[in-house]
Image: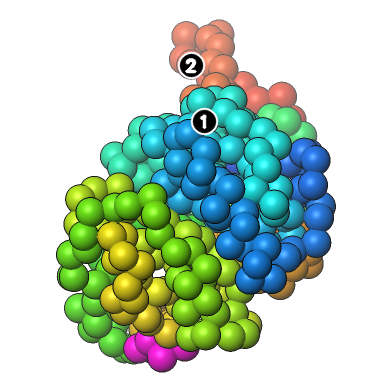
Amino acid sequence: MKFVDLLHRWTGGLLGLLLAVLGLSGAILVHRDAWVILPHARDAQLQDLAVMVGSVERLMAGSPSPNAITFASRDFGLHRVRFPGEAGAYADQSGAIVARWGDKWERPELWLFDLHHYLLAGKTGALVAGWVALIGLGFIATGLILWWTRRRTFEFRLWPARMDRPGIVRQHRDFGVVVAPLLTLSLLTGAMMTLRPVADVLLTPWGSSAELRNSLAAPPTKGGASTQQLNWTRIFGETRRRFPDAEFRVLSLPEKPGGLISIRMRQAPEWLPNGRSILWYDASDGRLVEARDALSMPRGARIFNAVYPLHAAKVGRLPYRIVMTASGLALCLLGTLSVWTFWFRRPRARRSRNGRAEVVVKSAPVRSHPG
């Protein structure tokens, strides 16, 4: 038990601040669409074929032309447009630009997203965040073991009764056991998205890792040279014909020679906000290369497609967003207080009359620190 206690304390002391950053940024991002205040942001979603084609043609005629367009959703009335590099824009559903930026630092929702997913360090940061999430799961497991030995003193508090070390430790222990299921959901889904081997292992009962990768990979077919003279009416018409009841969600243009145009659609049963029903077209002539129905994917891939909506509260609407907000704030509180008690709130020592050091705590004796 002493080893578990040491492992838990040092994990919290060293990684608590990173967990707090992930928790707080995630809690804010859950409500990202609600706090982006721009003209037309609350417009009703339009999925009329003529409107969709008109907005795409208008955006494609601009300079520079976009790399990708995420179309307006039921909760957010603007298209998100991505240009080469970090540049981007919001456009209304007619294709008119309402806000533009040159890099992510100009929009708080963008750098917060980058902080949460990549720790502002690109692919390396994403891997670090994934490992922190995985270690956080171990943090929960050791915390539950330590709580069990003191379960008879359980008392739920949102905030420590006293801001001394024993008071913080007790609140940390009892509050942590209450929110453990929520934290497990947040950290596990985060680890599955950033560390693909974790997803492969967990989804093994429902399919092989090769099946999962093949289901999510683009077709191996190479396309021709991109052209600006594409017939978008024909492309979007074919897409609508293949999935007549689905939403248009994302149009992506090839960024490398030989790449394909892709259009992501979301069918009603899909939890994933941008869907995983995808059609690929040749960028030289608009010829359909492949269409993939998310509802026909192997079971393991369909389960994996539900991981992001669960993590980012893209299902369940406001009640579930509140739940995941609570999870993020709880992780922030636990991580911050772990670092505080480990590095700063140490008991101070004084010399007794016989020259020996004595630990002094104002209101309570020092206990073994499980957090």
Residue that numbered label 2 is attached to: 357
Residue drawn at the location 31% of the way across and 60% of the way down: 283
Query: What residue span does the magenta drawing correspond to?
Result: 295-299
Left or right side of 264 for 341: right
Q: Is residue 64 above or below residue 46?
A: above
- Kindly identify which numbered label has been placed on residue 104: 1
Question: Is residue 151 magenta-colored?
Answer: no
Q: Earlier in the sequence, mark 1 or mark 2?
A: 1
Q: Residues within 10 Å of mark 1 (few under 14, many from 20)?
A: some
Identified by mark 2, the residue type is Ala
Q: Residues within 10 Å of mark 2 (few under 14, many from 20)?
A: few
- The x, y position of residue 100, in whole percent, is 61, 31
Q: Nearer the viewer, residue 251 or 19?
A: 251
Q: Nearer the viewer, residue 56 or 164?
A: 56
Question: Is residue 298 magenta-colored?
Answer: yes
- Prevailing secondary structure of the magenta residues: helix
**Corner quadrant of residue 366:** top right
Identified by mark 1, the residue type is Lys
Q: Nearer the viewer, residue 275 or 46?
A: 46
- The x, y position of residue 362, in whole percent, is 71, 24
Which mark's residue is nearer the viewer, 1 or 2? 1
Residue drawn at the location 25% of the way across and 58% of the way down: 259
- How far apart marks 1 and 2 lie (CA) works out to 53 Å
Left or right side of 8 for 28: right
- The x, y position of residue 121, in whole percent, is 36, 33
Q: How is the image coloured?
A: rainbow
